Amino acid sequence: MPITLEYKDAENKLLLLFLIHMMDLPMRRAQITDFVVEKDIMNHFTLGENLTDMVVRGFLESTREDMQDESTTSYSLTESGLANLDLLKNQIPRPVRNMIIKYIDDNRGKIRKSFERSAHYFPNVENDEYIVKCNILDDRRGNMLMEIQVPVVTREQAKHIQSNWNANYKAIYQKILATLIE
């Protein structure tokens, strides 16, 4: 029996749900892309269609750090996505599940570290400004150590703050903390 396009899409979506669930933290689109392309599971366009469809259907939730850069979108499972995965995960062949689990074991630390800090900006519709939101998480406990929201006038300023935060977040955190406890 030939594999239909609908079956392959359903299989791809199930694999994506399993990958994100097993990672046990949100995954950025770039990280998901690296996995599916490296393992030759699906191409970039199919991945995009599947992720979009699962967000629309309520299986995944998405958040974007940089409104202009789709690769910074992070995906996490919703309750509906988890319920569907629980129902269907046995349909994923064991070798494929093992491949995903091995990938997660090999990459979880690196992916978790990428969530140690984040900076994103978005337009403030009320007053033609941008809001830059920067934060640091405690990698060991997942607690928020610091979150800063800064209003700026231009998108260029927002991108500059985002870039500086990503490059210097530890030093900035230490300076702010030292100033606050003086």
Image (cartoon, rainbow, N blue to C red):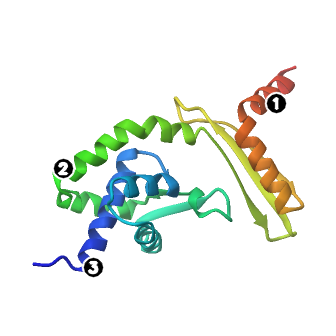
Comparing labels 2 and 1, the label whose residue is closer to the camera: 2
Of residues 151 and 52, the one drawn nearer to the viewer in this rendering: 52
| Mark 3 vs 2, N-terminal side | 3
Q: Amino acid at mark 1?
A: Ile
Q: CA distance from mark 1 to mark 3?
A: 53 Å
Left or right? Give the position of 42 relative to 166.
left
Residue at image location 68% in from the left, 65% down from the top: 68
Left or right? Give the position of 108 relative to 118.
left
Mark 1 surroundings within 10 Å by alpha-carbon count, few (fewer than 14), some (14 through 19), many (20 or more): few
Q: Which residue is mark 3?
A: 6
Task: Give above or below for 62 relative to 114.
Answer: below
Q: Secondary structure at mark 2?
A: helix
Q: CA distance from mark 3 to mark 2?
A: 22 Å
Comparing labels 1 and 3, the label whose residue is closer to the camera: 3
Can you say which quadrant of the picture contains the N terminus? bottom left
Q: Secondary structure at mark 3?
A: helix
Pinpoint residue 120: horizontal percent, then vertical percent: 70, 54
Q: Which residue is mark 2?
A: 95
Q: Amino acid at mark 3?
A: Glu
Marks 3 & 2, CB-CB < 8 Å contact = no
Q: Which residue is mark 1?
A: 176
| Residue at the outermost top position | 182
